[in-house]
Amino acid sequence: MHRLEGLSKLSGAERYLDDEPLEGALKGCLWGMTVRSPISRGKIRRIAYGAGFDWSKFVVVEPGDIPGPNETYLIENDQPVLAPGYVRHMHEAVALVAHEDRNLLRRAAASIRVEVDADPPALDFRVAPRADQIQRGSDNLIKKLQIKKGDVHAAFANAYKIVEGEYETGAQEHVYIENNAMSAWIEDGPNGDVVVVRGSMQCPYYVLNALKHALGRDETRVRVIQAPTGGGFGGKEDYPSTIALHCALLTLKAKRPVKIIYDRSEDMAATTKRHPSLVRHKTAVDKSGKLLAQQIEVILDGGAYVTLSPVVLSRGIIHAAGPYTCENVLIEGKAVLTNSVPYGAFRGFGAPQTIFACERHMDRIAHALGLDPIEVRRINLLKDGQTTSTQQTISGGTDRHALLNETLRVSAYDKHKRESEAFNKTHPYLRRGIGIATVLHGAGFTGNGEVYLNSKVDVGARPDGKIEVLAASTEMGQGTNTVFTRIAADAAGYDTADVVVGVPDTFRVPNSGPTVASRTVMVVGKLVERAIDDLAAQLGQNGKPLRGPSLKKAITDWHTTNPGKELKGRATYTPPPNVKFDDKNYVGDAYATFAWGACVAHVEVDLRTAAVRVLDFTAMQDIGKVINPVLAKGQVQGGVVQAIGWALSEEFKFKDGGMLNNTLTNYIIPTSDDVPPIRVVFHENPYPFGGGGAKGVGELPMDGPAPAILNAVAHATGADARAIPLTPEHLLPLL
Amino acid sequence: MNVLLPNSLAEACDFCAKQPDLIPLAGATDLLVHWPLRQAEHDKTYLDLSKLQELRTITWSANSLTLGALTTYWDVLQDPRAKSDFPLLIESARQVGAIQIQSRGTWAGNIANGSPAADGVPVLMAYDASVALTSKSGTRSVPLHEYYTGYRKSVRRSDELISAISIPLRRYDFAVFHKVGARRAQAITKIGLAMTRESAKPATWRVVANSVAATVKRCAAVENLLHAGAPIRKPEDFAAAIASDVTPIDDIRSTADYRRTVMARLLYHSLKGVSPAIS
Amino acid sequence: MGFATSQSSMNHQSTQSSATLNGTIAIRFTLNGREVEIAVDPTERLLDTLRYRLNLPGSKEGCGEGECGACTVTIDDLPANSCLVPTFQVRGCNVRTIESIPTSSLQPMLETGATQCGACTPGVVVTANWIKEHSSVLASHTLRALMAGNLCRCTGYDGIIDGLEKWIGNPKGGRP
Ligand SMILES: Cc1cc2nc3c(=O)[nH]c(=O)nc-3n(C[C@H](O)[C@H](O)[C@H](O)COP(=O)(O)OP(=O)(O)OC[C@H]3O[C@@H](n4cnc5c(N)ncnc54)[C@H](O)[C@@H]3O)c2cc1C
Ligand code: FES
Ligand code: FES
């Protein structure tokens, strides 16, 4: 089955928010813009609206215009909708302006000056804050978490060798190609007027909750509709709540529809990024390379507000020990508040950072012991029946050793290794090398997260016999609609043409949870199957559910006898059996299941320029059952290339805590000419509790490439690089 | 915004003579970047050269190649003779932006824009090109290596337009172009190098570097080293000459150290074996 | 940057010139095979004219700086970033947008997964279609080099390159 909306996208017919004419609900629409902070921390003395503009012709929103609490609803409601007299990061939203003439609005907005008294910002999360930089508790700590298994200290005392290392990763910008875009208008409803927000987003119910909270309305008086979304990668997970609130506030004040479309430089400067990290490893090993103790410290830069940092940290520490078995593990993690733009969700959600450190460290252990990096991985890879750092017993039947061997075979690892070593002896300035990483990725929300989410899916049975999937899970390029259609059709015994996926609209779809954490196919897909089972059982006779044509006929018959009524199948999340997690002590089943993978990078380093080029890349993934090979492969290839960018070129330049290179000219993502074809191999092993037998695929590909590439650079040149992005400027001194 | 739409070069020069602050507009690939954000520039007056067919010419004569001011990178890439006679023009054109930029960006715009990172300029300079500056009072020719007077400053008067670029046809036995950017395509140069050796007797070296000084820079000290046949055994042997020729800085794209080091390495590895003194 | 709080000049008038009328310029050009006549403000970019005035929103704005290629159209049969073209410059030109490419021809790109989120896709398809119509450029350029002006953050490019190879019937175009 091909991507459902594929031809519409390829032909340019798909209508994203900014493509729509200002008609219908958007008739008389104003453009909105955001006035932002010029400093990283300080008091706002005054917002000076420039002379020369008739401000009575503009709609201006300041914090006083917010009907409810000036808070963006999330884990902790510490982030204001508009900074109330005090700013905590550069480019923080301070006020809003709108006008129907977009160019005039741009000029007017540029005339606004935010007058401030600066306070000393905390900008380096790696060092303890000075007294005058403290803004939260006594130490700016957002969250502290610990995982403890066995006794690392005793193991260190008896170790054959102790290997230590410090690893750093930088911020990363999502660079979805469609910038943030949101619209809002007011409609009549049975309980009074309704604020409708429609835009580019991953998680309609996050937006709904934010609107309810700050506008002081219940869910009958706010409505959120997803518009076609041109990429997200986590970047449209929590940020759209902010821009939706901005849009809604302007529309409430103007009593007219409002659209806010960010331009690229605003989107890059003001929205969330991947958390920068610092990870320290101290590992006890025996002579053979077996891990005896892993002590790991993880520090994340959380940015100026809490946002999602506690959960990013949680996933980060759970993945920090890698796909290995070790009896003694101590992982301490903290997320620290700074005056950077708040860091948020980004594909992998903390795991790529800690896996980078772990996988680079594994190679350094091998090096310290004079062993082959493959061997060190082999003897430590988890086997079914062994436990992870949280003492989760691994099961499921994936043979990780076979997976590793297969990866080596399809990537021609030995051949590339031999040839590289020969090549390096003769070439005057090019050096080739090969590197590996073995990874895992917990699928779905961490710990009891899925239980708390309590996700729901409905399927509507339409009078024409077709089935409509009603879920809040969004299509943003990753193929939700296509995969849901396939899963629903298979479950119902239908032709895919008889399945429709409804537009995520909080007036029509139940909360199936956020579209994040590689959970959509596995968790929500399973709910789609179960909702269809429920429908089939409702219509079945003698407890025998209906399928295929008989189901379709039963639906049309039902509607004939119940005209005008609604028929729905429903499902609510239930956890797989025997999954238990103690989220206070971080002990137990952190995830219902893990996806597993290995990847091999073959690179070439130019000693003249220190530029690294990836010559060949293989990604092996166990994602359960592959539901749509083209879509799944596309997810892996896209994730790998995003990870190559993170590893080699996507460097943030900061000035006073703000992003200096907030343009596509200066923030360097890979082009088609910078990357090789990405070889993808799936190791299939159906997961019985996932939709269609699938586990998550979206994030795993982000985990392995960066360490594999740096391991390859080390093999090629001997350079012991431990920080990414490894730009030529950073590599040059190491050569 | 106001825009003037001349029908001929003469008319364009008339406009320039009358209004000294006109901004010429060719392929607009520099001028329109982030255009909606640059509202202040919408208030200026522009002179659209894009329809002046007389400037859209590539002319080969017995002793030179002349590129009319509207010649684009793509035009040169399509020229049947450019590759054999001026291979560096081809190499640099292929590495400017991507095809969408090559199709509209002009060589004259690249010169006039005055960016020290310009990729068209070093290769033209290494081929000893000169710039034809035309005004109401006539045309004068300025050697490209004397064109710039400082960061984004040049000898071009405000009533002058670049009307053509002229490159003498000479025999070269060595020519190389290096562009080091942050990625393989669509990248602004962090350090670039164009070098030629004219096979006259005695051989004449031209070494030009970009992104390492306030302007694209002809490197006299490096050239002297090569003319003198000084023995060179490692990249560092160029260090003193580099220090006297260029003044790289730390900026958003790279560092001074990186630029200096890479320049030395590119010089060394490109020249190794080319002359007996360098091994 | 414009969204921040920098100063901007307040002079908001445009003066007349010999070739402009009421501050606008009347131009004529061929758009997707049809003659178009339109009066444009001199500050208008072709991308905005197409999207907001001529009801052709297929071309997208990904950056407004010439990097991403989401706004790619062809002008006189060469790919160009319409965000960098003042509309008055296309007077007399032949402009083609994504809307000129028949949907039925796009099946090969669909099959290989050339689109995911779709935001880069119209620009990708315009460049790809141009390569298909000028396959002689493959004698001197690889597909990967020719596509380098179209940034895609979703596909990792393989779906695009594979689709293009299939589309033009050149199984080797993308490999170096
Ligand atoms: C995405 C992108 C990538 C790029 N990549 C590269 C690159 O790799 N290497 C590189 O060198 N450049 C690059 N550029 C910059 C630009 O494309 C080139 O400098 C190009 O040659 C400019 O030519 P143009 O005709 O488009 O100039 P315009 O934008 O029309 O004009 C540029 C300047 O020159 C002046 N001007 C133009 N023509 C004349 C004339 N005849 N007489 C007097 N003044 C004149 C203008 O007034 C203006 O100041 C890139 C630009 C973009 C947007
Ligand atoms: S919008 Fe024109 S190149 Fe990005
Ligand atoms: S398909 Fe999303 S950016 Fe290309």
Image (cartoon, rainbow, N blue to C red):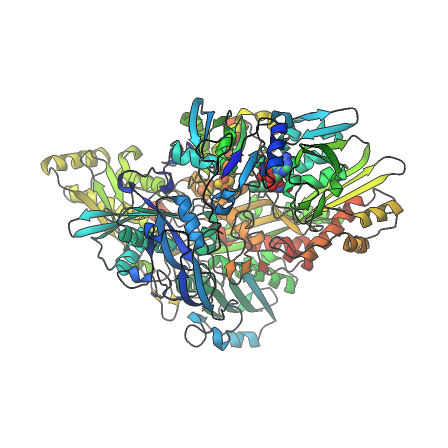
In this view, the residue in front, A730 or B139, is: B139
C10 lies above or below A149: above
- For this view, does B232 lie left or right of residue A116? right
Q: Which residue is at the far left?
A: A561
C162 lies above or below A524: above
Indicate the position of residue B186 as horizontal and vertical percent values: 59, 42
What number of labels is visible?
0
Q: Quadrant of residue B258?
A: bottom right
Note whether residue A586 is visible: yes
Task: Name the residue rendered at 79%, 27% in the picture.
Answer: B63
- For this view, does B135 lie left or right of residue A138? right
Indicate the position of residue A312 as horizontal and vertical percent values: 42, 61
Indicate the position of residue A106 as horizontal and vertical percent values: 43, 48
In this view, the residue in front, C37 or B14, is: B14
Quadrant in which the C terminus of chain C appears: top right
In this view, the residue in front, C101 or A625, is: C101
Task: Name the residue rendered at 53%, 26% in the picture.
Answer: C76
A261 lies above or below A285: above
A571 lies above or below A493: below
Note whether residue C58 is visible: no
Indicate the position of residue A498 as horizontal and vertical percent values: 27, 34
Q: Which residue is at the far front?
A: B18
In this view, the residue in front, B248 or B215, is: B215
Q: Quadrant of residue A671?
A: top right
Dividing the image into four equal quarters, which quarter contains ligand 1?
top right
Task: Name the residue rendered at 52%, 55% in the picture.
Answer: A438
